Amino acid sequence: MSRSAHSATTLAALLALGLTLAAQDAPAPSRTGLDLAGYWTTVFHQDAGLATGGGMIGDYGGIPLNEAGRIYALSWDASRMTVRQQQCPGYVIPYFYFAPQSFRFWEERDPYTQELIAIKMYTQTSEQTRTIWMDGRPHPPAYAPHTWTGFATGAWSGHILSVHTTHLKRAWLRVNGVPQSDAATVDEYFTRHGDRITYVSVVTDPVYLAEPWIRSVDFVRAPRDPAAWLYACDDAEQIVGRPDDVVPSHLFGQNPFLREYSKLRNVPLLGALGGPETTRPEFMATLAAATDADTLPRLRPVPGPSSASAVADPDPHDGQIHVWPVQGNVYMLVGDGGNIAVQVGDQGPLVVDTGAGRLSDKVVAAIRTLSPRPIQYIVNTSFHPDHTGGNSALRASGRDPSVIGSFFSTQFADAGRGATIIAHLNVQNRMSAPAGQPAPTPPEGWPSDTFVQGRRRKFHNGEAVEIWHRPNAATDGDSFVQFRRSDVIVTGDLFTTTQYPLIDVKNGGSVAGLIQALNDILDRTVYKAQEEGGTMIIPGRGRVTDEWEVAEYRDMIVIIRDRVQAMIAANATLEQIKAARLTVDYDTRFGSTSGPWTTDMFVEAVYQSLTQARPAARTQ
Amino acid sequence: MRSLAGVVLLAGMVALAGAAPSAQGRGRGQVPSTPKAAAPFDLTGYWTAVVTRDWRFRMVMPPKGDYAGVPLNPAARKVADAWDPARDEAAGEQCRSYGAANIMRVPGRLHITWQDDQTLKIETDAGMQARLFSFSTPRPAAAAGWQGTSAAQWEVLPGFRGQAPLTGSLKVVTTRLKPGYLRKNGVPYSAQTTMTEYFDRITQPNGDTHLIVTTTIEDPEYLTQPYLYSTHFKRQADARGWAPRPCTAR
């Protein structure tokens, strides 16, 4: 066979193979759709001024806000943007594509298979890279950190790229105070027609929206590099000398700018306040007949019982201990009540808090997967049983070689046999009892190494570890722990992502001390970029965060404190204060109507600590 | 040899990919006989506007001279600044803001049906307008009208290597428009306007289905650049809320 004949035969066979392949039933759907790569710029022909100007106060028409979202927005003071942590936040996905900026889209493919791994998007104004995973990977667990761009997975539905995003930070739907919670998820659709992409976003937020919010915006291809890709933002003192427990906000019904937008744009206030009904065509008739009297009830909370949180607890409650690598040498253990932090290295693990003690065997087993060495130190941030319940078991599983062989061992036969438990003296006092009286907890779980001043420090596992006591915060014995090289802070009960702060007034807690403690934490955090990353936070309960969430939590407590204080100043009784629903804009996120720490108990604790006027002594 | 074989195989694939598109779900080689049969997705039924964009321009009458966002030239601004709804009423032109270039932005409901195998019909309850999308060569109307003349086609992308075609869009180009308003407060478009629309359908994980209409308006008389917007409608199971009402100038 000549060379050419051989080639022709082979070609025919290959062509036939190609036709055979084509004739088979369609294989699994392709992960590849249209090419989105390139530079794109947002077109602002719709909602002009909202993106570039952020929107006027009181411009919420067409947003399906629920009561909590509406009251939050009405209470928002633009001066809040002068608070340090509010100055340089990134753009969260529900806002990301509606902001004034250009984008760069590109694909990331496996170099060997050319399978599409991810579609990436970089934004001009906020210097953020977004990743949309196209390889079918699952979303992370609920206790994983949230970010501005969240965790996104995509798939091609024909010529439309569909994206589902979770794990978003709490942020703004519109930069005029309309909030978006960290429980929000977004379904997105990118459709390309020539040199134009139509982007559709559907935000679902059980905390602040009554129903999903659909919007669209258009991008056009930029023929050349738009440049100016960086976001030069750094926070600074904008109000010099302002105490750090001041967070600007408006009391209910006292927003002086509320009607500006309504008057300027000929929009009846009833429509301007938003709500699901404002998105429907028939609302035009309602608007035509609207009066101010129709609107007044919407400016304050509706009387009635408070709402419970609409957000699921990130703890899986599956009887297992889950390990999350936080940063550096520090891990978070979830599953046994309060969060447990574990620092590992060349020495024995240093453990912060021991959980409720129901799953201590599994906690010890989980720690052994992180380090072959026995636990050397346990630090208790609080005496509360959610943080100390596993003390006895974890201590028994450990060993403190720094004590064995020291002079202590000449005085105590069991010195170093078991981990050393470190805590503020008040923790030991609350867990123990004077001789002859029954103690609330077994002695083998009591702290054995206590301190009384504001700071205890150690250099362990190759890094500086600082234990900061914050007096009269959640209790009189709280501490937070800072791992300086790993850049992780463990807050204990001073900060959670799951509930209002447990201010235990009976045991020395106070709202002023708690706010001070949160500010002390914020004094020690540094974000990496756009209020994200950098110092990571392990809360007493809930998911891993960074300083942004701590600041938002601080702001919430300050705002609620101010509302309670204002009613106290107006001679309101505790019952009147509770009935006023002063936490209405946070209840769907943090509220509880049953269980060990309800919204009513929190409000009462704020009231008590304000009326008792306990000074928050500061010791350094 | 290996590289040459690859070239031929690729050529075969390209040839297949370039074959005439067929509607999704049909066997290959069976070219649908009509545009109605070729529809890659079902547009028919009732749809309600979900007004979340340009809310203040759509749900209430914007103040005179408020044409923010529309890339108007000075001549258009002059027209918009002279807007007088009483004059429109007197001239019997209350439907100026219900023309094709704005009708999809008017809060209301759509009823979409196939008038025949070649013509898709969109009726609106707001202003009681009817748009006809002709998949055959449209027969120009004797005179320009509020809804103009619309030429439609399915844009379906072929699949590679025997895969089903990618679901496509409905593309509609509308011309021969009677001059009207892009917004109710007299922001003008001219008889020179060409409007290009793409209709896409998305279904969310919760089962909600939306119609997304991507619109480009080009008007050499009044616009400095193409005016772009996109509008969304939620599918309804029935005619609930369908409320035909005449055009109003105010």
Image (spheres, coloured by chain):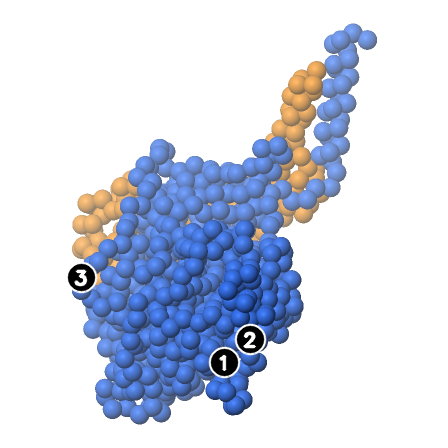
Q: Does the residue at mark 3 contact the one at mark 2 (Cβ under 8 Å)?
A: no
* Rendered view: A582 above or below A23: below
The answer to whether any part of residue A204 appears in the image is no
> Which circle marks residue A240 in the picture?
3
Colour applied to chain B: orange
The residue positioned 37% from the left and 86% from the top of the image is: A604
Chain-order first, disc 1 or disc 2: 1
**Residue A508, how many percent across, how many down?**
37, 82
Residue B27 left/right relative to B139? right
SS type, badge 1: helix
Q: The blue chain is which one?
A: A
* Rendered view: B8 above or below A2: below
Task: Identify the residue under disc 1.
Answer: A431
Per the model, the C-alpha gap separating discs 3 and 1 is 43 Å
Per the model, the C-alpha gap separating discs 3 and 2 is 47 Å
Q: Residue furthest top?
A: A2
Q: Which of B53 and A7 is in front in this view?
A: A7
Identify which amino acid the numbered label 2 is placed on.
Answer: Gly
* Rendered view: A260 above or below B3: below
> Which circle marks residue A51 in the picture?
none
> Which circle marks residue A445 in the picture?
2
SS type, badge 2: helix
Per the model, the C-alpha gap separating discs 1 and 2 is 8 Å
SS type, badge 3: loop
Chain-order first, disc 3 or disc 2: 3
- Which chain's residue wears label 3? A
Residue A242 left/right relative to A198? left
**Residue B95, how many percent across, how many down?**
33, 59
Q: Does the residue at mark 1 contact the one at mark 2 (Cβ under 8 Å)?
A: yes
Image quadrant for the N terminus of chain B?
top right
Residue A111 left/right relative to B82? right
